[in-house]
Image (spheres, rainbow, N blue to C red):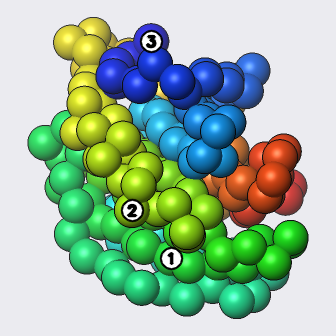
Amino acid sequence: GIFSVMVPANWQTQRDPGSHIVSFINEKSYASVSMGVILENAATTPTADKELEMVQAKFPGNCPQAKIQKRGPATLVGIRGAFLLVNCTNSKGGLEVMKFVVASKPGMLLVFNSASPAPIYKAVLPALNSMEHSFKLLASTGNRTPDPARKPPGQSAILHSGAIRLRNIPRSPRPLLAHRS
């Protein structure tokens, strides 16, 4: 791996084979976190703002009722980026709170996204913040080369990697934003 994170004991890990993203799910609260490091060609690495614009552009088709509550600067592992805080009604009619955080530097995108049912968001926020602040790059990250199976040009690396998930209440996750080739 190229990053580490402290995960609360009651969260389960889910890894999609072939993805740069790891997800952590709290089955009791239905909160989830997806995070990862996506290595890119340094010349074509999008800025965090550009990456979030691509995410936001998918809202009309995947979450037509999305309401951006807040946006602003963010930092992941000391690298500057940006975040979006979004409310979205899921397919069961429940309100979700989602936070999309991206940091970017030439050759690398860092992603930290979380989702929670709105009624319990404040209760799970300490765990979400703890995971976000414990996100660390390992020393060997700088020696890695971009994945040859990286995202297609002009597509969101977050979407291509499956980093965005929306929890359906009461059970199974479904992709909020899916990459279509």
Q: Quadrant of residue 109?
A: top left
How many discs mark residues in the rendered view? 3
Tell me the mark number nearer the camera, choosing from 2 and 3: 2
Q: Amino acid at mark 3?
A: Gly
Task: State the separation of the CA atoms marked 2 and 3.
Answer: 31 Å
Q: Amino acid at mark 1?
A: Val
Toward the left, the furthest residue is 78
Task: State the separation of the CA atoms marked 2 and 1.
Answer: 14 Å
**From the viewer's perspective, is 30 left or right of 137?**
right
Please name the residue shown 33% across and 79% down the image: 71
Q: Amino acid at mark 2?
A: Lys
Q: Which residue is mark 2?
A: 122
**From the viewer's perspective, is 157 left or right of 178?**
left
Looking at marks 1 and 3 on the same chain, the residue that comes earlier in the sequence is marked by 3
Dot 2: few (<14), some (14–19), or many (≥20) neighbours within 10 Å? few
Looking at marks 2 and 3 on the same chain, the residue that comes earlier in the sequence is marked by 3
Looking at marks 2 and 1 on the same chain, the residue that comes earlier in the sequence is marked by 1
Q: Work out which quarter of the rendered image holds the N terminus and state it.
A: top left
Q: Which mark is residue 1?
A: 3
Q: Position of residue 82 (x, y in %)?
A: 30, 66
Q: Is residue 83 visible?
A: yes
